[in-house]
Image (cartoon, helix red, strand yellow):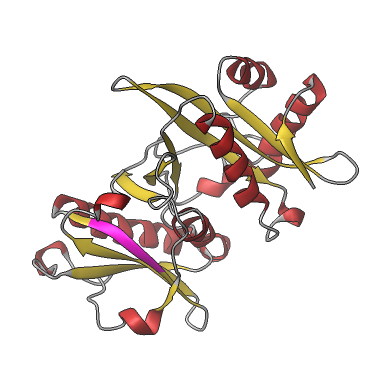
Amino acid sequence: MDIRRVATWSEYEACVALQREVWGPAFAECVPAAILMVTQRIGGVVAGAFDGDGELIGFVFGMTGVEHGRLVHWSDMLAVRSDARGRGIGRELKLFQRDAVRAIGVGTMYWTFDPLVARNARLNLVTLGASVAEYVTDMYGAVTSSALHQGLGTDRFIVAWPLDDAAASAPRTETPLARYAVIPELNTMTTGRMPVGAPAVRVSIPLHIDRVQTTSLADAGRWRAVTRRAFLWCFEHGYHVSGYYRDEPSETAGYILSAGAPHSSRTP
């Protein structure tokens, strides 16, 4: 596998084709080849993972800009072909992107992911060590043209990855659910019964939300409603995401949220 910047027009077009493969042929938010090319020309990143035959099997796309007088980078897309997943390609693309933007003085990288997608939570929070900065309801609209969003809307965590602090972006440890079993779980609690003042709480998600969507869009929608209520309550009451767990036997995963400000080395 070769990870490098996309360089030719045909490679940019291959990135567009991969977007449609991952998000669906009717995906209206597809970024065209011309925009990918121009973004890379002015400080953004479009990098691809190529197999031994030179075929694109994954890509990452992000834009560099200025926030509060400092350079930041927004990683907008990360896609890996379905038959190439589970090989660490997403991680390697992110690391390439990190090194590319750090070289031009970027101090922080941002991106979003769906809190209900456990595999993305594990990549972003455990493997890469990013920190959750914000929860946004329907960030990209309540309804999109992508089959991936059916029944769910587009609630997102915005994560921050500090690039100039190795300790703040170090990988974390994924902890078994048994360690957190005594921590209050918010999924079944109504807003009026939330454990105000608890030092830590947890919010569970399905281990495979895509399977839930395939079986029942109504069930998928209920997962969104329950976790949305829990996360909004947590952020309103000063909790921050401090851990991630996974439990294969019950096919669930989840987040630990701790009261108070995050440790200084984890502050976005």
Across and down, in percent, residue 120 comes to 51, 55
Instruction: Classify residue 141 by image quadrant.
Output: top left
Across and down, in percent, residue 63 comes to 51, 25
Q: Is residue 249 above or below residue 138?
A: below
- 164 left or right of 119 in image: left
Instruction: Classify residue 28 by image quadrant.
Output: top right
Across and down, in percent, residue 41 comes to 62, 15
For the point 58% across and 44% down, the residue is: 95
- 156 left or right of 118 in image: left
Quadrant assignment for the C terminus: top left
Pick the residue in front: 203 or 72: 72
Identity of the residue furthest to the right in this view: 53
**Residue 25 visible in the snapshot:** no
Q: Which residues are magenta?
A: 240-244
For the point 31% across and 19% down, the residue is: 69
**Residue 108 visible in the snapshot:** yes
The overriding secondary structure of the stretch rendered in magenta is: strand
Instruction: Classify residue 229 by image quadrant.
Output: bottom left
Q: Is residue 188 above or below residue 141?
A: below
Across and down, in percent, residue 219 comes to 43, 64
Pick the residue in front: 140 or 109: 109
Query: How many numbered dots are placed on residues in this image?
Result: 0
The verdict on residue 145 being magenta is: no
The verdict on residue 243 being magenta is: yes
